[in-house]
């Protein structure tokens, strides 16, 4: 009996021994010492984190393979090169690290992907984005992007022409305009003062506000806002008109929105970023601005008024049968909340979700472990509204990114939709925070500004209903037309893309 | 030179059973197969890869050298299914993977008991071929918080999916002689795979295995 038991156990061990153990994979979504400790002081370990993190979290591997990328070959080729950096004595030049990092990420197609690693020998943050590397190779597109990255449409030419029947606009992050009016006030005020200390205080306040202006120009909004609010508090005793503190959420969720009703009842809406929900949706608003200042409350009202003016114009004129059409201006829209879709295209189509794209998620530790391709119905307005059957024209450009591209795609898929402009950025896959990592066990690698490696990675893959992936390519408009930037002249001249949209609606110009 | 030993072995195989009353039997069998899928889910702690039942059917042939020793083989179709679910977000994921395999076991057969009713046990190896995959169930689109029911054929990925399988096979059962040439049998059997269902296509090694236990009944015709 004993012999039989020994034989049985031996046989079981033999069976179990025939199976191999998988390599251990750790999560890079949280601040986990085991995952990042080695990467603090080693370039090879940084590369290892990046490679393995992307291997699990990135959901485009089959697409990358089709495009010729062998991710394992990347490991074989670059791990020794990063390891060689560890052997260098003294500081490793940022340029050298950057060159290697760029080579690693360049073949990837995701339009949002940005990788940031810390050069521990210099303390510098080195970042690389495949989209920007692709852009750098296309000189014409790069030139267009440089012109249009911060483009904000202007309707003053059309207002002056008398082509605009109604107009409203809102800017939720008007530090620049507050700074301009405050510094103008200080300049005048100091001329009337004799008290040297008071003059010095005013001048010091102006100096700090000028610094904020420089930070804004450098697009360093968070720092600008911090410095601005400190200045407001420090110089409160000067009672500078309009100089009020601004909530930091307003910088994160800045909004520039313009509504116009053009002649022929064409309802126009432009949006620089998709940050509408925090202002228009009570649930979001209560979370983001639980105790809004007077300034913020007024701003929330302004955003509501502007969007509602556009929405009401569409409802009223459609019901009256004299709506000419709708223009949605997504040029240089930098993206934002997916839930905002209901306030633009989602407000023009029937309730119940608008399906124009499919989504796919990671579903396991393997590079090719994916969910099925599933319909991703975008949010629609669930309150009563008309379905717009009149022409809907969308304007886009190479700086139309993420949700801006989703809107473009949504209009392109409408039977009454037309897209005018230039090819969009090519970054449609949605991202979420580290907190949502376990929703799909996909997304960011590391934590921004905290871990030695951080990769801004989407949680999903978005594709057309027939499975085509547009990452790195973007959406090609129905009518390709570049902005005549010189003629536009900062909004003082005609906007040929907008003209084409108006002509399409008014004259049925195909 | 090589031909001679082979000829001798063939003759021995023919003469040995004739002298000991050896016999062939062939049969058909069908039943249910419960498969358990093993993989390292790493830190994805709320994922569950649970076992699932499938069907199995096939033909088998047995050649007995002696009344108590034979060799059994056959060809069977079996579904080696499993379920992928979550514990933390149970309503979000419940997917049944149905995997079709053709399996060819070669086992030594040991039998014991009387003439009419005999017990048996088989031990051996099997080779298999994964011929197709299908999945169905409930998924979740987290970006828009929508559930999605689906049923789809899953194309095998030649880079990732290992179609060929190999492992250990075994069974235990009872055979009942119901007529001079006919017998029925019932058995519990199992396949223990030692070949990963995924090829090692990644620098990070990832091994996944099937373990299948089945119950089936069959009928034999004895020559």
Image (cartoon, helix red, strand yellow):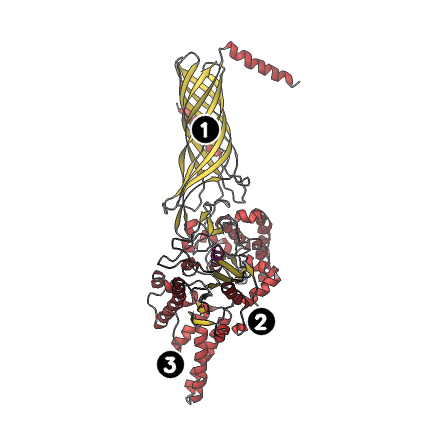
Any mark on residue A239, and which? 3
Between circles 2 and 1, the one closer to the viewer is 2
Residue B151 pos. (x, y %): 43, 40
Give the distance between the C-alpha atoms of the residues marked 2 and 1, in whole angstroms: 82 Å
Asked whether residue B208 appears in the rendered view, the answer is: yes
For the residue pair B128 and B54, the one nearer the viewer reads as B54
Span highlighted in magenta in the image: A408-416
Name the subunit of mark 3: A
Asked if both marks, 1 and 3, belong to the same chain, the answer given is yes
Count of marks placed on residues: 3
Which residue lies at the image location 38% right of the left edge and 46% below the top edge?
Answer: B92
Marks 2 & 3, CB-CB < 8 Å contact: no
Between circles 1 and 3, the one closer to the viewer is 3
Q: Is mark 1 on a helix, strand or loop?
A: helix
Q: Which residue lies furthest to the right in this view?
A: B1
Q: Residue under circle 2? A: A486
Marks 2 & 1, CB-CB < 8 Å contact: no
For mark 1, does the 10 Å Cα neighbourhood hold few (<14), some (14 to 19), or many (20 or more) residues?
few
For mark 2, does the 10 Å Cα neighbourhood hold few (<14), some (14 to 19), or many (20 or more) residues?
few
Specify whether residue A412 is painted magenta: yes
Residue A205 pos. (x, y %): 44, 79
Name the subunit of mark 2: A
Sequence-wise first label, 2 or 1: 1
Decide: is A106 above or below A195: above
Asked whether residue A149 appears in the rendered view, the answer is: no
Marks 1 & 3, CB-CB < 8 Å contact: no
Q: Which residue lies furthest to the top in this view?
A: B19
């Amino acid at each position: 009996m004993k012999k039989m038991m020994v034989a049985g156990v031996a046989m079981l061990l033999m069976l179990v021994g025939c199976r191999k153990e998988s390599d251990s994979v750790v999560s890079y979504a949280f601040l986990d010492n085991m995952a990042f400790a080695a990467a603090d002081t080693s370039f090879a370990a940084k590369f290892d984190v990046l490679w393995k993190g992307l291997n699990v979290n990135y959901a485009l591997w089959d697409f990358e393979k089709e495009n010729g990328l062998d991710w394992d070959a990347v490991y074989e080729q670059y791990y020794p090169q990063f390891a060689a950096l560890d052997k260098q004595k003294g500081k490793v030049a940022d340029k050298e690290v950057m060159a290697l990092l760029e080579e690693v990420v360049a073949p990837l197609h995701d339009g949002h992907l940005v990788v940031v690693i810390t050069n521990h020998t210099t303390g510098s943050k080195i970042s690389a984005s495949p989209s920007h590397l692709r852009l750098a190779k296309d000189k014409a597109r790069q030139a267009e992007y440089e012109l249009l990255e911060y483009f904000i449409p202007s309707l003053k030419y059309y207002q002056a022409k008398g082509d605009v029947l109604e107009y409203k606009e809102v800017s939720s992050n008007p530090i620049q305009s507050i700074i301009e009016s405050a510094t103008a006030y200080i300049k005048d005020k100091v001329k009337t003062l004799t008290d040297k200390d008071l003059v010095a205080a005013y001048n010091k306040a102006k100096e700090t506000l000028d610094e904020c202006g420089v930070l804004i120009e450098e697009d360093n909004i968070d720092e600008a806002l911090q410095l601005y609010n400190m200045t407001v508090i420090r110089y409160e005793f000067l009672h500078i008109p309009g100089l009020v503190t601004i909530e930091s959420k307003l910088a994160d969720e800045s909004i520039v929105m313009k509504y116009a009703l053009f002649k022929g009842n064409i309802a126009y809406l432009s949006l620089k970023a998709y940050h509408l929900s925090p202002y228009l949706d009570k649930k979001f608003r209560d979370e983001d601005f639980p105790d809004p200042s007077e300034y913020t409350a007024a701003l929330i009202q302004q955003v509501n008024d502007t969007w509602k003016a556009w929405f009401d114009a569409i409802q009223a004129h459609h019901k009256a049968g004299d709506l000419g059409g709708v223009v949605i201006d997504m040029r240089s829209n930098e993206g934002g909340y997916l839930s905002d879709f209901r306030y633009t295209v989602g407000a023009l189509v029937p309730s119940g979700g608008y399906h124009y794209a499919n989504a796919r998620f990671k579903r396991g530790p393997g590079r090719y472990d994916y969910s099925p391709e599933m319909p991703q119905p975008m949010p629609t307005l669930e309150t009563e509204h008309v379905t717009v059957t009149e022409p809907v024209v969308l304007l886009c450009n190479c700086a139309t990114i993420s949700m801006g591209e989703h809107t473009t795609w949504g209009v392109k898929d409408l039977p009454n939709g037309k897209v005018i402009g230039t090819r969009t950025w090519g970054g449609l896959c949605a991202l979420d925070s580290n907190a949502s990592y376990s929703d799909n066990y996909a997304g960011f690698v590391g934590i921004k500004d905290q871990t030695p490696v951080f990769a801004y990675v989407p949680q999903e893959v978005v594709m057309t209903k027939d499975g085509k992936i547009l990452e790195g390519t973007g959406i090609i408009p129905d009518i390709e037309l570049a902005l005549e930037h010189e003629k536009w002249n900062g909004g003082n001249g005609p906007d040929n893309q907008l003209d084409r949209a108006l002509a399409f609606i008014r004259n049925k110009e195909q | 030179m090589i031909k001679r030993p082979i000829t001798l072995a063939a003759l021995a195989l023919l003469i040995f059973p004739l002298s000991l009353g050896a016999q062939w039997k062939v049969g058909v069998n069908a039943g249910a197969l419960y498969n358990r899928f093993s993989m390292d889910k790493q830190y994805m702690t709320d994922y569950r890869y649970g076992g699932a039942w499938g069907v199995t059917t096939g033909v088998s042939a047995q050649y007995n050298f002696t009344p108590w020793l034979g060799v059994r083989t056959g060809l069977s179709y079996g579904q080696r299914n499993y379920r992928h679910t979550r514990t933390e977000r149970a309503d979000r994921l419940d997917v049944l993977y149905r995997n079709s395999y053709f399996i060819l076991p070669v086992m030594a057969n040991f039998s014991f008991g009387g003439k009419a009713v005999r017990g048996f046990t088989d031990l051996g190896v099997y080779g298999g071929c994964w011929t197709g995959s299908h999945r169905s169930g409930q998924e979740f689109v987290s970006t828009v918080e929508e559930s999605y029911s689906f049923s789809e054929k899953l194309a095998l990925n030649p880079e990732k999916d290992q179609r060929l399988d190999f492992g250990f096979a075994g069974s235990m059962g009872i055979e009942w002689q119901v007529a001079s040439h006919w017998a029925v049998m019932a058995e519990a059997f199992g396949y223990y795979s030692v070949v990963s269902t995924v090829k090692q296509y990644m620098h990070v090694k990832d091994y996944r295995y099937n373990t299948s236990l089945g119950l089936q009944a069959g009928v034999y015709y004895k020559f």
